[in-house]
Amino acid sequence: MRILVAGATGAMGRELLPRLAEAGHEVFAMVRGESAKAAASRLGAVPVVADALDRAQVEAAVREAAPEVIIDQLTAIGHIDTRKFERSFAATDRLRTEGTDNLLAAARAAGGVRRFIAQSNGAFTYARTGGPVKDEQDPLDPAPVAPMASMIAAIGHLEKAVLGAAWTEGIVLRYGAFYGPGTSMAPGSEQLEMIRRRKFPVVGDGGGVWSFIHIADAAEATVAAVENGGRGVYNIVDDDPAPVAEWLPELAAKLGAKKPMRVPRFVGRLAAGTAGVVLMTELRGASNTKAKRELAWQPTHPTWRQGLTPNP
């Protein structure tokens, strides 16, 4: 199939483009500038240049690629400062709203796009009530704390737009927290160094449940969605959701560090902001049962306990 990947040269794109090409697909990569064209070519894709926030450029790129499938991986997530959570996600929020709208409009105008697959978030967005692990039928957080509201609203906009596009088969992939090459939890990353230096404490009871996914497994699941997916939402996470109080000390031990310090919620709020406290104490994990059943996909790294290591 002819496939256009938007957001093609980030951590996900570097894993996804070669896999699509190896699977026999004709892959096009929508990149923002000339400097990214060579990178896309090395990854096995034909580059087309467009700014995702410029509708005319996006329409031209889609016409040039004439894809049967569009994969929307548009993000601009760099360092996340939980004290400035809204600011950290502002550029990505815009890509998930305006950028996704531009891609959908261009796809509809061009015709021939049978499937539209979009990156969503299953790590930080589920309602913070009920059981510790959520499936795709569970709602996004209807009452997020203020710093997280715009991020969750952008996710909601993206999902509604993609799933509501009756002219194509809309698929939403709610990825867990990425780790592995090129991610914020890559070996040697700032985040792992903070854990190594005991600068990443357990806040409160550490009851926030995280769902992880290795970036390579996320890419494999995306290829599976291209080939086997149907309209709807899929959680792309590993088999082992775990509370912070469990995964953080275990990861610290892998890094050769002492046990993380424990601090009360009010201290955590001062150091990491309201969003940081939510991530540490109230988060809900996600189940991958549907994705494994319907996409014929199994994570190669079924648990962060083996996959999330200090070495490449």
Image: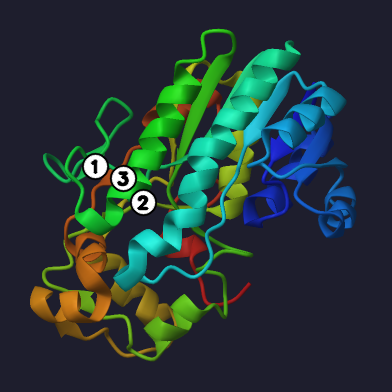
- Residue farthest top in this picture: 167
What residue do we see at 70% from left, 23% from top? 69
Q: Earlier in the sequence, mark 1 or mark 3?
A: 3
Residue with the mark numbered 2: 211
Query: In terms of depth relative to the viewer, which is nearer, 56 or 63?
Result: 56
Asked if disc 2 and disc 1 are in contact, CB closer than 8 Å, the reply is: yes
How far is mark 2 from mark 3, CA to CA? 11 Å
- In the image: residue 79, left or right of residue 285: right
Q: Position of residue 67 (x, y in %)?
A: 78, 22
- In the image: residue 175, left or right of residue 260: right
Q: How is the image coloured?
A: rainbow
- In the image: residue 299, left or right of residue 5: left
The answer to whether residue 108 of the structure is visible from this angle is: yes
Residue with the mark numbered 3: 125
Question: In which image quadrant can residue 155 be found?
Answer: top left
What residue do we see at 19% from left, 54% from top? 145
Which amino acid type is marked by label 3? Thr
Image height of 108 relative to 285, above or below: above
Which SS class for mark 2?
loop
Residue with the mark numbered 1: 133
Query: In terms of depth relative to the viewer, which is nearer, 4 or 14?
Result: 4
Q: Quadrant of the N terminus?
A: top right
